Image (spheres, helix red, strand yellow):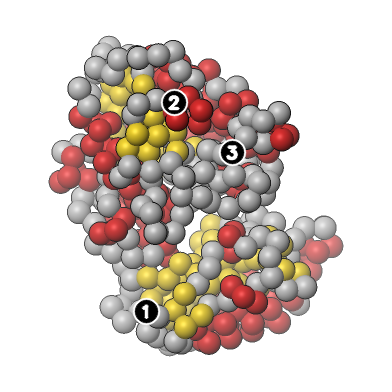
Amino acid sequence: MKYALIIPDGAADVPLAELDGKTPLQVAKKPTMDWIASHGRVGTVRTVPKGMYCGSDVAIMAVLGYDPRKHYSGRAPIEAAAQGLIVDPDEWILRCNFVTIVDGIMEDHSAGHITTKEATALIGEIHRILGGQTVRFYPGVSYRHLMTIRAELKNVSTTPPHDILGKPVAAHLPQGEKADLLRTMIDRSQAILAAHEVNVVRRDLGENPATNIWLWGQGKMPNLPSFQSQFKLRGAAITAVDLIRGLAKLIGWPAIEVPGATGFLDTNYAGKGAAAVAALDEYDLVVVHVEAPDECGHNADVAGKVRAIGEIDQHIVAPVLERLRKEGDDWRILVLPDHPTPCTIRTHTGDPVPYALAGKRIESVVKATFDEPSAQDSDLHINAGNKLMEFFLTVR
């Protein structure tokens, strides 16, 4: 058997006035996803356990078959695993975004999707001035970076910057015991970044500058059992972001790199599709993650989200399905967002998401399409997201 799982991150949404009361999934041109829905089954799954933060870290951990209530320890440690960071037991790991704050308002959680080259120069300067024996900064991709600190942050609460777009930041700065250390670094970063030549050029070009670092997602390194020990299958992941690379590494998978994969709307969709097709020759299960719909949701870019879904269908889902069908009957495919990212609120929700699966021994009940209303009308509703993988691999 060959299995493929495609995750259009944040693609689920709500009916939008711009789309005449329809969702991006309903409007997007996605004949292959609709084929999977009509020839297989659709349903909903709650990927984020009630009471937990609605993020891709929690949701995709569940989609991969791991219970976040048992294994989740924070977002930053997962990304640290992707970078192969060696972290001492007394160190905490935090996500370090470059953001744009204007007059105390969180204008942009990504500093205009700053390039990795620019951000690497900035994080190097931040580390030179703010780093030391107890604090270290590590470059990542685009606006996404990491910081480690030797301080007890167990009682500290932080807020993801994409949750407070358009809102005053003062009420969302780190809170709790030792949080003053983090607030001080966020504050000091402003002066360091203001005069840096990278930001001078970005302002001259009319691009959002990186005005501050923003610290969040703290935790300690988790220890997950391998996917092969859990499900007896060899898997691989294709992604542009460290979060998924880290989850892959933690469960014993390689993360296959694709040139031009950016984690944004301009990503190399065709390259990801081709890499998935090739990977199916070697691995039992291939997971392809695409960040673009989620970023469009954060940016309230309705047209971009519709376009991203169509690109994923054409350049990833279609060639992967074509490759699987060469296996005769011995294949299955599953498509689902990890969580909704409604354009109306520009952040994640924990609502159940639609999924569609097709392949061996999965019989069509009704001729459905792949979207939120069709999934809601189904009788397949999974309340624990970590049970979806077992259902996908073993359903009869």
Residue at position x 67%, y 49% from top? 299
- Secondary element at tag 1: loop
- Taking the image as shown, residue 297 lies to the left or right of residue 4, namely right
Nearer to us: label 3 or label 2: 2
Q: Residues within 10 Å of mark 2 (few under 14, many from 20)?
A: few
- Taking the image as shown, residue 2 lies to the left or right of residue 53, namely left
Q: Quadrant of residue 235?
A: top left
Q: Position of residue 3 (x, y in %)?
A: 30, 28
Q: Indicate whether 160 appears above or below 319.
A: below
Indicate which disc, 1 or 2, sits on the residue closer to the N terminus.
1
- Residue nearer the viewer, 273 or 34: 34
Indicate which disc, 3 or 2, sits on the residue closer to the N terminus.
3
Residue that carries the numbered disc 1 in the rendered image: 154
Q: Indicate whether 253 appears above or below 86.
A: above
Q: Amino acid at mark 1?
A: Lys
The answer to whether the residue labelled 1 contacts the one labelled 3, judged by CB atoms less than 8 Å apart, is no
Residue at position x 75%, y 61% from top? 208
Which quarter of the rendering shows the C terminus? top left
Q: Quadrant of residue 47?
A: top left
Q: Quadrant of residue 13?
A: top right
Q: Residues within 10 Å of mark 1 (few under 14, many from 20)?
A: few
Residue that carries the numbered disc 3 in the rendered image: 14
- Residue nearer the viewer, 166 or 207: 166
Q: CA distance from mark 1 to mark 2?
A: 42 Å
Indicate which disc, 1 or 3, sits on the residue closer to the N terminus.
3
Q: CA distance from mark 1 to mark 3?
A: 36 Å
Q: Indicate whether 37 appears above or below 66.
A: above
Residue that carries the numbered disc 2 in the rendered image: 377
Nearer to us: label 1 or label 3: 3
Residue at position x 42%, y 71% from top? 218
Residue 117 shows in the view: no
